[in-house]
């Protein structure tokens, strides 16, 4: 305010300082506009603003007056109070944001607005602050809806400004204090033109790294360690595993880890018609066939230069293209359809299949020479039923992702629901687990997902109805059975993280004999390929 004076007074900290200052100002009929106290290391720093316009007090007179206070160490005139500096800083911070920000109190009075919001609304700060939101946005107000319904509100809006019509996306959320009392709402506004630019910038596929793989089972850890070791080589990698185990994600992670500058190009050999496989993989020259481009077209092997070409479902590739693939792998050269020039290619090749290629070779359904050429380095991803200890980690991660996507509060999985996840054989593996968790998140309205929301593939129908499983009906929901599921998990986890059964027994604080009995009880065995303890399936 004009005519007001601001000071900083430093005292040796003692009781009654604020009272003494207030009494002194009252005796002189001076009004305290603002006062702030900061205590630190035995001192009290007091910032104060005094209204002097109607009094004959100047700076020196006030200095003399303050000097009469006990314990005063120093006094200084201020140009601005700490709270004014903070307000200026927050205003600068808000104005520097790319989104428009506006907040209102519980009654709808605007108490915060930044420059981006002013620009989107076509108003100046002074005309907005302190106004009721209905005066700024009388119709279809997002903030009005938010404070009346006290729920998050989002929608597309537009405003008519001096520079024309501006479209923006507004998202408002209610604000509650530490006691849970509703105190207002805040609105974020994003110019739709900027949103579109942002979407274009991130529309390219995200890189997948080994950090994206969820799992603590020894077999997964060993696979990742092995894959990292071979990623920077140019050797062909063959990834095998059942459908839904994550073969393409693993291939992408190898490509990223390799540091190759070229693209990752996936090709589903089962999805391409036989007559198109060769033209897609190797390209063609002008006039190679009816309908060919006049300028010809490079194949995907050429497009993957300095990168990785991923031949998924290679077991479904017809015999003809198999021979040409073999030549590319042996010589590093491709010849476009209808052409004579041999073009060198330097793409890293990764193949994947869920079929037994060795058996297919014996049955003359896959070329033997190609089989041995692609089996330089082999990675076999285990099915989900052989890595039971990873199910809780995967399920919780998928659930958290679904909650964010659906705008739900964080949900948890009940003990019975988790036990049901353990008992499934998961023919669709990780992909199926992800679908089950997403379905459960959609169906469950509570913060805890119960067993009746866990619908496996054989429990759903095309009409959206579901068969009630014996598990949900209580067939396997006794306390004894639930404890058994968790005991099985703990035993498997300990066996797979220990060098021997005896060491595992020591970790569990039970005898070696007791652990052997539990292994027999749960029908556990060590897999020949994965060297990991698993549960035998009933015959």
Image (cartoon, rainbow, N blue to C red):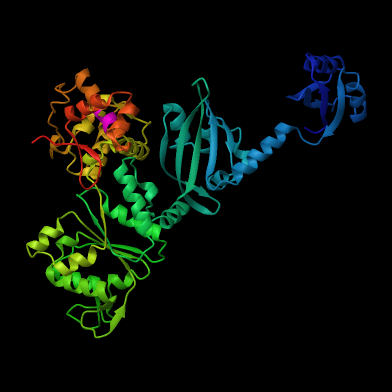
Quarter of the picture containing the C terminus is: top left
Residue 231 rendering spot, x and y as whole percentages: 36, 59
Q: Nearer the viewer, residue 441 or 243?
A: 243
Q: Residue at x 40, y 64 (%)?
A: 260
Residue 163 rendering spot, x and y as whole percentages: 54, 54
- The residue furthest bottom is 340
| 480 shown above or below 359 | above
Residue 43 rendering spot, x and y as whole percentages: 79, 23
Q: Quadrant of residue 363?
A: bottom left
For the image, the number of numbered tags is 0
Q: Nearer the viewer, residue 62 or 436?
A: 436
Q: Nearer the viewer, residue 38 or 374?
A: 374
Residue 57 rendering spot, x and y as whole percentages: 90, 26
Quarter of the picture containing the N terminus is: top right
Q: Quadrant of residue 125?
A: top right
Q: Nearer the viewer, residue 126 or 98?
A: 98
Q: Residue at x 22, y 24 (%)?
A: 484
Q: Residue at x 35, y 59 (%)?
A: 230
Q: Is residue 491 magenta?
A: yes
Q: Is residue 444 visible?
A: no
Q: Is residue 415 visible?
A: yes
Dominant secondary structure, magenta:
helix
Q: Residue at x 19, y 59 (%)?
A: 313
Q: Quadrant of residue 314?
A: bottom left
Q: Which residues are magenta?
A: 488-492
| 26 shown above or below 366 | above
Q: Is residue 456 magenta?
A: no
User: In the visual, does 290 lie left or right of 160?
Assistant: left
């Amino acid at each position: 305010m004009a005519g007001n004076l601001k000071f900083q007074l430093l005292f040796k900290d003692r009781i009654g300082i604020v009272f003494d200052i207030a009494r002194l100002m009252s005796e002189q009929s001076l009004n305290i506009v603002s006062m702030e106290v900061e205590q630190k290391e035995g001192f009290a720093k007091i910032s104060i603003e005094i209204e002097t316009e109607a009094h004959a007090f100047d700076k020196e007179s006030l200095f003399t007056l303050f000097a009469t206070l006990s314990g005063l160490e120093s006094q200084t005139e201020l140009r601005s109070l700490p709270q004014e500096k903070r307000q200026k800083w927050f205003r600068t911070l808000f104005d520097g944001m790319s989104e428009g920000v506006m907040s209102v109190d519980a009654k709808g009075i605007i108490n915060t607005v930044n420059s981006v919001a002013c620009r989107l609304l076509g108003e100046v700060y002074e005309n907005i602050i302190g106004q009721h939101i209905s005066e700024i946005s009388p119709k279809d107000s997002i903030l009005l809806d938010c404070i009346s319904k006290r729920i998050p509100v989002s929608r597309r809006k537009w405003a008519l400004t001096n520079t024309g019509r501006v479209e923006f996306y507004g998202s408002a959320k209610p604000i509650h204090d530490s006691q849970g009392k509703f105190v207002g709402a805040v609105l974020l506004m994003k110019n739709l033109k900027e949103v579109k630019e942002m979407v274009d910038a991130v529309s390219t596929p995200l890189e997948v790294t080994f950090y994206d793989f969820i799992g603590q089972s020894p077999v997964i850890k060993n696979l990742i360690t092995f894959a990292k070791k071979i990623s920077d080589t140019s050797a062909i990698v063959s990834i095998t595993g059942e459908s839904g185990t994550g073969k393409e994600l693993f291939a992408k992670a190898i490509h990223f880890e390799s540091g190759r500058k070229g693209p990752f190009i996936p090709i589903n050999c089962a999805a391409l018609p036989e007559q198109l496989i060769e033209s897609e993989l190797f390209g063609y020259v002008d006039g190679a066939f009816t309908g060919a481009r006049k300028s010809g077209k490079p194949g995907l092997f050429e497009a993957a230069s300095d990168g990785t070409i991923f031949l998924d479902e290679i077991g479904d590739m017809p015999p003809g293209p198999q021979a040409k693939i073999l030549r590319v792998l042996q010589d590093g050269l491709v010849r476009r359809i209808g052409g004579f020039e041999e073009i060198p290619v330097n793409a890293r090749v990764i193949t994947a299949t869920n079929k037994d290629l060795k058996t297919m070779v014996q049955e003359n359904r896959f070329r033997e020479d190609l089989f041995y050429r692609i089996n330089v380095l082999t990675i076999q991803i285990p099915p989900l039923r052989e890595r039971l200890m990873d199910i809780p980690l995967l399920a919780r991660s998928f659930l958290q992702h679904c909650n964010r996507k659906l705008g739900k509060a964080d949900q948890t999985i009940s003990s019975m629901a988790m036990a049901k996840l353990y008992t499934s054989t998961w023919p669709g593996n990780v992909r199926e687990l992800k679908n089950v968790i997403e379905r459960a998140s959609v169906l469950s309205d509570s913060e805890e997902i119960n067993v009746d929301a866990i619908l496996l593939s054989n429990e759903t129908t095309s009409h959206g109805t579901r068969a009630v499983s014996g598990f949900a009906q209580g067939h396997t929901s006794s306390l004894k059975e639930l404890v058994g599921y968790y005991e099985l998990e703990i035993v498997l986890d300990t066996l797979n993280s220990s060098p021997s059964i005896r060491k595992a027994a020591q970790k569990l604080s039970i005898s070696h004999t007791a652990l052997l009995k539990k292994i027999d009880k749960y029908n556990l065995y060590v897999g020949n390929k994965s060297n990991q303890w698993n549960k035998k399936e009933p015959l």
